Image: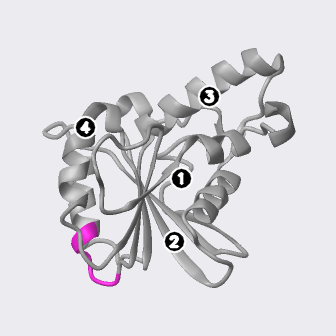
């Protein structure tokens, strides 16, 4: 992956299956709790909220987003755009926080989504020029392996978005993924009181 793509200073590595799992769960539960249908997520809003929660400030930032997906997660649920191969590969958008560039990767028959995600994480961690890694990994499936890799990463700011507080001590920052997803789905703070 590193040979094909020059890495930006900020790289988001996302397991599409995990994002779908979280989005589906939040949408189902909050539609029931709020007694209303939630909007589809505009991905530019979701990634702006993720950037804000990761501490990215306004400016001419370059943010690379790598989606790892398999045949079961090739479409993002409740999101626009949603097709990882046709709509989100090699596209970008810009706003006051910089340029967000999307690339999507699907494992070949010889590797699993988990294997490709973990290997991609190692490549990003070792890539020259990367200063900040933002990780959305499916911890419920392979979280221990993610922690094993991240604990050895040096000279990088690491922010992991997850749904549960880490059980073990970690040497990187974590943020709750639910909040940016809820914002992108149109859940207002005053509805939660």
Q: CA distance from mark 2 to mark 1?
A: 14 Å
Badge 2 marks a residue whose secondary structure is strand
Badge 3 marks a residue whose secondary structure is helix
Taking 144 as reference, is 135 above or below it?
A: below
**Image quarter in which the N terminus is found:** bottom left
Badge 4 marks a residue whose secondary structure is helix
Q: Main secondary structure of the magenta part?
A: loop
Residue at screen point 53% across, 46% down = 176
Residue contact between numbered discs 4 and 1, judged by CB atoms under 8 Å:
no
**Image quarter in which the C terminus is found:** top right
Q: Is residue 141 magenta?
A: no
Q: Earlier in the sequence, mark 3 or mark 2?
A: 3
Q: CA distance from mark 2 to mark 4?
A: 25 Å
- Circle 3 sits on which residue? 26
Q: Residues within 10 Å of mark 1 (few under 14, many from 20)?
A: some
Q: Position of residue 157 (x, y in %)?
A: 39, 72
Q: How is the image coloured?
A: one colour
Q: Position of residue 55 (x, y in %)?
A: 57, 69
Taking 51 as reference, is 89 above or below it?
A: above
Q: Earlier in the sequence, mark 4 or mark 3?
A: 3
Magenta stretch bounds: 125-129
- Circle 1 sits on which residue? 88
- Circle 2 sits on which residue? 63
Residue at screen point 25% across, 49% down = 146
Q: Earlier in the sequence, mark 4 or mark 1?
A: 1
Q: Of 163 and 111, which appears nearest the observer?
A: 163
**Quadrant hosting residue 69:** top left
Badge 1 marks a residue whose secondary structure is loop
């Amino acid at each position: 992956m590193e040979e094909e793509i020059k890495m930006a200073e900020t790289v988001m590595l996302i397991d599409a299956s995990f994002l779908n799992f979280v989005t589906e769960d939040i949408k189902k539960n909050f539609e029931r709790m709020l007694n209303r249908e939630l909007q589809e997520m505009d991905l530019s809003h979701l990634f702006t909220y993720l950037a804000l929660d990761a501490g990215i400030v306004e400016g001419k930032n370059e943010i690379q987003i790598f989606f790892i997906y398999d045949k079961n997660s090739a479409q993002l649920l409740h999101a626009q755009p949603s097709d990882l191969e046709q709509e989100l590969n090699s596209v970008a958008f810009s706003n006051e926080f910089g340029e967000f560039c999307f690339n999507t990767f699907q494992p070949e028959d010889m590797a699993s989504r988990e294997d490709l995600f973990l290997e991609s994480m190692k490549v990003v961690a070792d890539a020259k020029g990367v200063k900040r890694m933002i990780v959305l990994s499916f911890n419920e499936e392979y979280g221990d392996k993610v922690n094993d890799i991240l604990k050895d990463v040096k000279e990088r700011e690491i922010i992991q978005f997850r749904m549960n507080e880490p059980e073990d001590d970690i040497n990187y920052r974590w943020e709750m993924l639910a909040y940016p997803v809820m914002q992108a789905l149109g859940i207002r703070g005053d509805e939660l009181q």
